[in-house]
Image (spheres, rainbow, N blue to C red):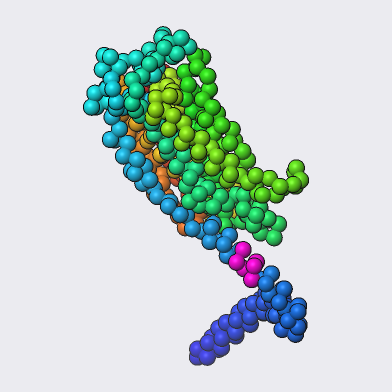
């Protein structure tokens, strides 16, 4: 009774198996043909070709490994800075003659850079020139600068900078890796981190590392900003203009050294970190605008390209936003330490703490495959909308903190 049904399914599965076999044979035929041709050649021909093939295998193997291995990636990387143990804001005297054991200036040592910064009406070139710190005084370094420099180190030293690697630039048979579902997540993540670094380097030059209108731009910070603006895709050789070039990672490494140089100078009380509330307002405003732009990119992709698991650009948007939040998680945590006096005096601690918690919560979203499904869908999730939600939550809190400071 069931024999015809069983025979039918046997024929169906036999046909499917034969079809799969034909497809596999068709895919493998070029390799089999090349292999047969190669075996029939003499060693004079086989040798050079074999060396080239081994070189290509190693070359691609190294590239694939670098795109998949995220060295020293740590969602809790902020913990190692022990920001809660910092006793004084950035740029303030921490130890030495004229300070107490807690880093507070005594009456005799009140004439410090931090003292001038705290009194805008005295922040004139003459007042700055008159600053005399006792020999041996040590000032607090900037946590923002420390974190920013370490993020550069993480991007280009602890990991290979993917965007400027030759095989990444060549793409997948001429197709940009960003247009494929493979090997581009780390590159997008690094570019997101780099966006946070670039934004911060600009603010360090324009406001945080100088007294606006009364002091010159710090040369180390200016150099760091210039180096961080270099494009993200330059290899050792280029076509436009034609000729050898300095690759992107070299410029970023130079920026890292410049930032560390600034902090060394700051620790000697020979540089300025202007930790006023108006500077924090401006910094938060720029970060909010940066996150707002990313939120708009996520929204546009989520609303207009609902390809689910088959949207090959969704992973680029997701990991860029993730990298940006990863960078700002450290930078804003550091800002809370550098502007500790402002945060405490203006009652920002509860909302600041909540913002940092939201940033950390966003970093828990690490799906294996990024899906850009319908928001009301039930089969394919919508990871872009989820990341956009966290981005907007963080931005909303930053805007609220900015408004409180601006009152």
Q: Depth check: 66 or 344 in front?
A: 66
* 258 w.r.t. 156: above or below: above
Quarter the C terminus occupies: top left
| Residue at 53% over, 19% down | 216
Residue visible at 72% across and 73% down in the picture: 48
Residue 229 place in picture, x, y as percent: 59, 35
Could you tell whether 103 is left or right of 195 in the image? left
- In the picture, measured across the screen, residue 165 lies left or right of residue 354, that is right
Q: Nearer the viewer, residue 374 or 46?
A: 46
Residue at 44%, 14% (x, y): give it: 128
Main secondary-structure element of the magenta-colored stretch: helix
Spot occupied by residue 388 in the image (x, y as percentages of width and height): 48, 41
Q: Is residue 101 left or right of residue 208?
A: left
The residue lying toward the viewer, choosing from 304 and 87, is: 87
Return the x and y of residue 368 as percentages of the image width and height.
47, 58
Vertical position of residue 294 compared to residue 238: above or below: above
Residue 330 vertical placement versus 186 (above, below): above
On screen, residue 55 versus residue 161, left or right, reads: right
- The picture quadrant where one finds residue 226 is top right
Q: Which residues are magenta?
A: 54-59
């Amino acid at each position: 009774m069931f024999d015809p049904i069983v025979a039918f399914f046997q024929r169906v599965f036999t046909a499917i198996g034969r079809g799969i076999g034909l497809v596999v044979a068709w895919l493998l035929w070029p390799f089999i043909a090349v292999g047969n041709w190669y075996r029939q050649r003499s060693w004079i021909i086989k040798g050079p070709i074999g060396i080239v093939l081994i070189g290509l295998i190693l070359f691609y193997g190294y590239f694939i490994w670098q795109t998949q291995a995220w060295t020293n990636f740590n969602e809790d990387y902020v913990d190692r800075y022990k920001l809660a143990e910092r006793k004084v804001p950035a740029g303030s005297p921490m130890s030495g003659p004229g300070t107490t054991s807690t880093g507070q200036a005594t009456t005799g040592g009140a004439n410090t850079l931090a003292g001038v910064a705290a009194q805008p009406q005295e922040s004139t070139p003459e007042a700055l020139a008159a600053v005399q710190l006792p020999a041996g005084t040590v000032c607090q370094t900037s946590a923002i600068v420390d974190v920013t420099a370490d993020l550069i180190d993480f991007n280009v030293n602890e990991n290979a900078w993917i965007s400027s690697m030759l095989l990444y630039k060549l793409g997948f048979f001429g197709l940009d890796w960003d247009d494929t579902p493979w090997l581009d997540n780390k590159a997008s993540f690094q570019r997101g981190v780099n966006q946070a670094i670039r934004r911060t380097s600009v603010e360090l030059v324009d406001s945080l590392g100088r007294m606006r209108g009364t002091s010159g731009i710090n040369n180390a910070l200016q150099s760091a900003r210039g180096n961080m603006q270099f494009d993200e895709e330059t290899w050792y050789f280029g076509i436009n203009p034609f000729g050898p070039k300095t690759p992107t990672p070299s410029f970023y490494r130079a920026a890292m050294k410049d930032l560390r140089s600034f902090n060394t100078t700051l620790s000697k009380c020979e540089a300025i970190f202007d930790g006023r509330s108006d500077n924090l307002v401006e910094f938060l405003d720029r970060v909010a605008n940066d996150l707002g732009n990313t939120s708009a990119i996520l929204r546009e992709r989520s609303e207009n390209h609902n390809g689910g698991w088959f949207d090959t650009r969704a992973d680029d948007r997701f990991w860029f936003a993730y990298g940006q939040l990863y960078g700002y998680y450290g930078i804003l945590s550091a800002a809370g330490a550098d502007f500790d006096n402002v945060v405490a005096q203006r009652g920002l601690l509860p909302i600041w703490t909540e913002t940092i918690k939201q940033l950390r919560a966003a970093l828990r979203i690490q799906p294996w495959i990024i899906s850009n499904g319908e928001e009301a869908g039930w089969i394919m999730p919508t990871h872009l909308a989820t990341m956009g939600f966290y981005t907007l939550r963080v931005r909303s809190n930053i805007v609220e903190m900015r408004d409180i400071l601006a009152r």
